[in-house]
Image (cartoon, coloured by chain):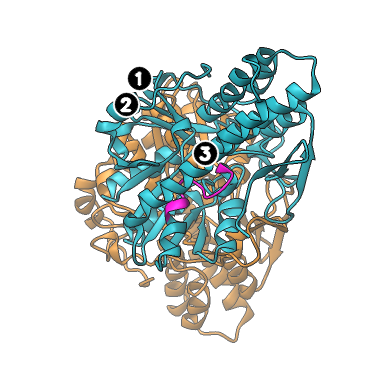
Chain colours: A cyan, B orange
């Protein structure tokens, strides 16, 4: 069974609590929009495309619960996290249908279908780059858990494997929340794709040693010029790939592209609780009186990107703005 | 009381078990060379200058225990870890005295004194660079714990603070063994130096945001041309500092310089057990069937180094070979 991050089930949203993986595979079912907001805020549900779909179904639950206007429900869900563009696109897709008296569930399901189809198309777009036995580095988790199905960064590797390729994946563990060692390694294991987990700081060593052929990551928000926000640490990998003359790819569905932002300078970067850095599974890592800083994302300038792997092919940053004009969709400003 | 990593006490080597910090400050005393070797191997005692001094005292213990030749004792201690140059220099300082029928303890104490004095001199050399309120990034631990007293990378910050400066330190947590969040943060706390722990992957974000003024690290072995080995992740910081036009300093006593190596290409890089990456404090971080790679060090090319902070001033890589010729000391090849 391929991994799915969430699905609709008898009037409820069912989702995998991603905080418990890989130790425990727990599915949560809820009919309350507040629970969906809390799941997004606490990263039980995470990954830009996945939280967009979760929020779309959250809007459906809000409508069924009653007591909130479409705008109020949208505000509740939009307040959960600031960086991922998809969150606001997913909310808006259902808000508009609800406000117009249309079928909200149909709108959410159409949005989910669109995301899943686009991720599959990303896999088909990107697979030819990963033929044979490529050694590919990725950061964070941009697999099915992050995107409902298929993944963004992992989709081309899955399609390449289905076509007989044998990709090997260097998995940055991705501190502080270890989405690499916990989630990406788990997904790759499910699909029998060879991989090795490494400390985030070891990626440069393996690049310099000639043991990495290319890098592919997902994104949380991509500006019109190709600057993009993704999990903190992504900027470091992009600079190191560039320094070592390795191709660096960013895979995303259209919902991640933010045509309203000319550059990455104005992308809001969420700073999360310092305890995520200072503690792990109840163990204190640093002295009691030490403080931490914990930006959840960083912004990588477009000049480090070889290509954006999109549902319609691999686009270099220079052609991005032109292509995006064909995908202008009204969306809630987020 | 300033922190000391180890000391000689009534015929025994006393050392802080650095694996237990910051939660527990445990001092271990031993009269057996095997225990010293094991402490170095397991990182209870770590940091290039500190393991050099620990091994010097280990030689003294081997002589007192009897049953081993100077060469056999040296081989036992030299087999513990491959990368740090200081280990072999410390062993050789005592092996030579022992083989010549001289006072082994006096040789070990002289070696320790030399390291401590050189680290203090490093502080004096480097302090002028860190005047005022500099925001300085460091990786791993190159403080007193790593060097017996004073530190290498941290020594200039300590001296700067004594002179009225107010340095702020960005502390890379330094996965997998967290020498940054556990040890550097603890030392800085002891000395009331302001600091914030960050995930290793966040350093680039803060550099790009203009929140870092310079980077300083220690080293485990420095080749004649200035290529150097240090804790894995150091290479990434060096590339990022260069990309962001920030000065990047490497602080080390003469025992870390390996005049026999023309470049860093032949420096042996220790690869440690994958469990250091896959588990933390008894918690499994990755799926049971996932594997990891765990190089303990990386090698940074000299071109990324602004200057080596030595006991005799700050030297750019270009002048290093010339200065090193004045410090040629016979040493065991390690």
Badge 2 element: loop
Magenta stretch, residue numbers: A147-156
First reached walking from the N terminus: tag 2 or tag 1: 2
Mark 2 falls within which chain? A
Q: Are marks 2 and 1 in contact (CB under 8 Å)?
A: yes
| Residue B105 drawn at (x, y percent) | 55, 66
Distance, label 2 to label 3, CA atoms, is 22 Å
Badge 3 element: helix
**Residue at label 2?**
A225
Q: What residue is rendered at 42% in x and 35% in y?
A: B204
Q: Is residue A105 magenta?
A: no
Q: Residue furthest bottom?
A: B67
**Residue at label 3?**
A115
Crowding at label 2, few (<14), some or many (≥20) Cα neighbours within 10 Å? many
Q: Say whether mark 1 and mark 2 are on the same chain.
A: yes
**Label of residue A137 in the image:** none
Q: Say whether mark 3 and mark 2 are on the same chain.
A: yes
Distance, label 1 to label 3, CA atoms, is 24 Å
Distance, label 2 to label 1, CA atoms, is 6 Å
Q: What residue is rendered at 39% in x and 71% in y?
A: B334
Q: Is residue A152 magenta?
A: yes
First reached walking from the N terminus: tag 2 or tag 3: 3
| Residue A36 drawn at (x, y percent) | 72, 31
**In the rendered image, which quarter is residue B269 located in?**
bottom left
**Residue at label 1?**
A262
């Amino acid at each position: 069974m391929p991994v799915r991050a969430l699905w609709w089930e008898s009037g409820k949203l069912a989702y995998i609590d991603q905080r418990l993986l890989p130790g425990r595979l727990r599915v949560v079912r809820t009919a309350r929009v507040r629970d969906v907001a809390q799941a997004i805020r606490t990263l039980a549900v995470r990954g830009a495309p996945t939280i967009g779909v979760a929020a779309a179904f959250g809007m459906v639950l809000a409508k069924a619960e009653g007591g909130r206007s479409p705008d109020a429900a949208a505000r509740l869900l939009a307040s959960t996290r600031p960086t991922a563009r998809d969150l606001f696109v997913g909310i808006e897709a259902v808000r508009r249908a609800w406000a117009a008296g249309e079928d909200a569930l149909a709108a959410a399901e159409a949005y989910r279908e669109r995301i899943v189809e686009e991720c599959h198309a990303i896999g088909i777009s990107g697979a030819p780059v990963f033929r044979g036995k490529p050694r590919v580095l990725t950061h964070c988790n941009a697999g099915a858990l992050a995107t409902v199905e298929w993944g963004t960064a992992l989709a081309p590797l899955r399609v390449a494997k289905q076509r007989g390729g044998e990709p090997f994946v260097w998995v940055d563990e991705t501190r502080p929340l270890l989405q690499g060692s916990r989630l990406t390694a788990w997904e790759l294991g499910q699909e029998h794709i060879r991989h090795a987990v490494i400390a985030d700081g070891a990626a440069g060593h393996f690049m310099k040693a000639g043991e990495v052929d290319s890098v592919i990551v997902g994104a949380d928000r991509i500006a019109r010029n190709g600057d993009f926000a993704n999990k903190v640490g992504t900027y470091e990998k992009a600079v190191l790939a560039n320094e070592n003359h390795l191709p660096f790819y960013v895979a995303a569905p259209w919902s991640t592209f933010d045509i309203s932002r000319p550059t990455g300078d104005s992308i809001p970067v969420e700073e999360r609780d310092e305890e995520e850095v200072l503690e792990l599974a109840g163990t204190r890592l640093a002295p009691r009186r030490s403080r931490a800083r914990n930006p959840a994302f960083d912004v990588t300038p477009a000049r480090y990107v070889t290509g954006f792997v999109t549902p319609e092919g691999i686009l270099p940053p220079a052609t991005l703005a032109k292509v995006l004009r064909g995908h202008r969709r009204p969306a809630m400003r987020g």
